[in-house]
Amino acid sequence: MLKEESVKRAELPMKEKMIDTCIALFGRKGFRETSIKDIVEANGMTKGTFYYYFKSKEDVLVYIHDTFISGLLHKQRKIMQTENYSYKEKLYAVVEMMILNIAEGVDSAMVFFREMRHLSEAKTKEILPKRDQFQKNIQEIIEGGISKGEFRSDLRADMLSYAILGIANWSYFWYEPGGEVKEQELTNIYMNIILQGIEEGKK
């Protein structure tokens, strides 16, 4: 057992290197336009090495999607479990986390949001539950804020959660990390717009 675990640890760097290359290639060229030949040549390895780790190019895309959304869910849950945060603060922290996540991994975000359409129906079903859970968690924060009187009670939490996702997620398309607008400033801009519409007493 120890020997097997040692082998697995030794294998991680090559797999991670290959994933990083795929993210860069999918982000720059697109999933469909990137061939397995492109991937193996960029890593200086054989097709046999590629197929040792993944059955197909689609499996790489699934891995990238799962890693991306799993990381987001983990960070989101930590925010939701912060007891001394108001619901307004939790919503702010989630939006800020989404913006920072895009800024820290623009190519990963681009692959996640843009390339999912290339997954088969079966593979999409593997990813959708986690994406749906991320949306439902935002909805839960809004519902909590409504119940505590922080947010207006005449609004639909489910529709608001989708609107917030749309506002924050679309940043992957145009946002330039290290540019004139910093992540916190962008978060403040977004949250000012959102809170003007949903905070109790703001209508």
Image (spheres, helix red, strand yellow):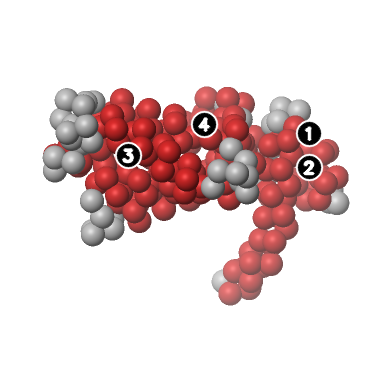
Q: Label 3: few (<14), some or many (≥20) within 10 Å?
A: many
Contact between labelled residues 3 and 4, with CB atoms less than 8 Å apart: no
In 3D space, how far apart are the residues under numbered discs 4 and 3 (Cα atoms)?
16 Å
Sequence-first disc among 3 and 1: 1
- Tell me which numbered mark, 3 or 2, is placed earlier along the sequence: 2
Neighbour tally class for label 4: few under 14, some 14-19, many 20 plus, Cα within 10 Å: some
Label whose residue precedes the other's in the sequence (1 or 4): 1
- The x, y position of residue 127, in whole percent, is 48, 36
In the rendered structure, find residue 35 and report the number of the disc placed on it: 1
Residue 83 appears in view: yes
Three-letter residue code for mark 1: Ser
Given the image, on which type of amino acid does mark 2 rest?
Ile
Q: Determine which residue is flagged by label 4.
A: 170
* Mark closer to the observer (1, 4): 4
* Residue identifier under label 3: 138
Type of amino acid under label 3: Ile
Looking at the rendered image, the disc whose residue lies closer to the viewer, 2 or 4, is 4
Q: Is residue 69 above or below residue 85?
A: above
Amino acid at dot 4:
Trp
